[in-house]
Amino acid sequence: MTTEIIRIFDADMNCIGEKAREEVHRTGDWHETFHCWFTLGEDVLVQKRSKAKKDYPGLFDITSAGHLTADETIEDGIREIEEELGVKLQFNDLISLGIIKEEIKLETIYDREFCHVFLYECNEMPKFALQEEEVESIHRIRLEDGLNLFKGVTQTIEVTAIDSGGSQIVSKDSFVGHDAYYIEVFKRIKELKAERM
């Protein structure tokens, strides 16, 4: 397996060098990621991460996301969508939601990211072809329910699998621990939708 080399930054987003991804997560260096959220009407689509993943296995998370390698631009991040979800999009299909600084510190990982966040508004449910080692399944949640969950207004929400239509009730513990990030992204999506009403 090849070593993934990514750019590292100071807290003001000035590039200060390059490191192996594994090292970056050990030392807590700031680095760049590409995030894309899919919405369908009032629903947000979330992926359930593969149980084989090293980081956050089996948890719900961003529709599609990944690290930008040292030789990639922000636009190159769109490859993650096709790799993980099997959905081919053009960069101009996406709506920028800006850059969000995100930090998670656990015993096994110190993850500090400048997240380049984008939105893809689906007119109909895409035909997904999931990369099994990355993504177990895709589910839908109500945008408002997600906001309420991560704000602590409610303790559980319903998630519905798009392939089987089966639903389950889950708590925040079923998601990667990006609470403040999720709130900010969902607020930006909600505001964008409200502007278009």
Image (cartoon, rainbow, N blue to C red):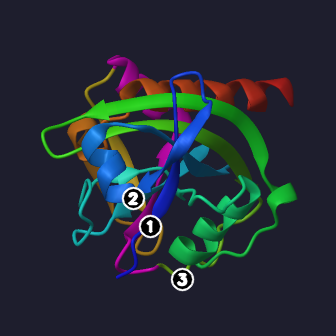
What's the residue at 44%, 67% (across, down)? 4
Any magenta on residue 151? yes
Task: Name the side, left or right, on which 159 lies relative to 144.
Answer: left
Question: Does dot 1 land on a helix, a strand or a loop?
Answer: loop
Q: Which residues are magenta?
A: 131-153
Residue type (three-letter) at the residue carrying disc 1: Glu
What's the residue at 63%, 41% (across, down)? 117
Q: Is residue 30 above or below residue 61?
A: above
Task: Name the side, left or right, on which 132 lies relative to 51.
Answer: right
Give the mark nearest the N terminus, 2 or 3: 2
Which quarter of the image is occupied by the C terminus? top right
Cβ–Cβ under 8 Å for marks 2 and 3 = no
Q: Is residue 41 visible?
A: no
Task: Name the side, left or right, on which 35 lies relative to 98.
Answer: left
Q: Is residue 126 visible?
A: yes
Using a 10 Å C-alpha cutoff, classify the residue at mark 3 as few (fewer than 14 neighbours), some (14 to 19) or many (20 or more).
some
Q: Is residue 115 above or below residue 12?
A: below
Residue type (three-letter) at the residue carrying disc 3: Ala
Where does the image place residue 2, in percent across and percent down from the top left?
40, 79
Label of residue 4 in the image: 1
Give the mark nearest the N terminus, 3 or 1: 1
Label of residue 20 in the image: 2
What's the residue at 55%, 73% (across, down)? 85
Any magenta on residue 4? no
Where does the image place residue 67, in percent across and percent down from the top left?
51, 56
| Farthest-out residue, left | 107
Cβ–Cβ under 8 Å for marks 1 and 2 = yes
Question: Does dot 3 land on a helix, a strand or a loop?
Answer: loop
Q: Which residue is at the front of the view, 189 or 82? A: 82
Residue type (three-letter) at the residue carrying disc 2: Ala
Q: Which residue is at the front of the view, 104 or 82? A: 104
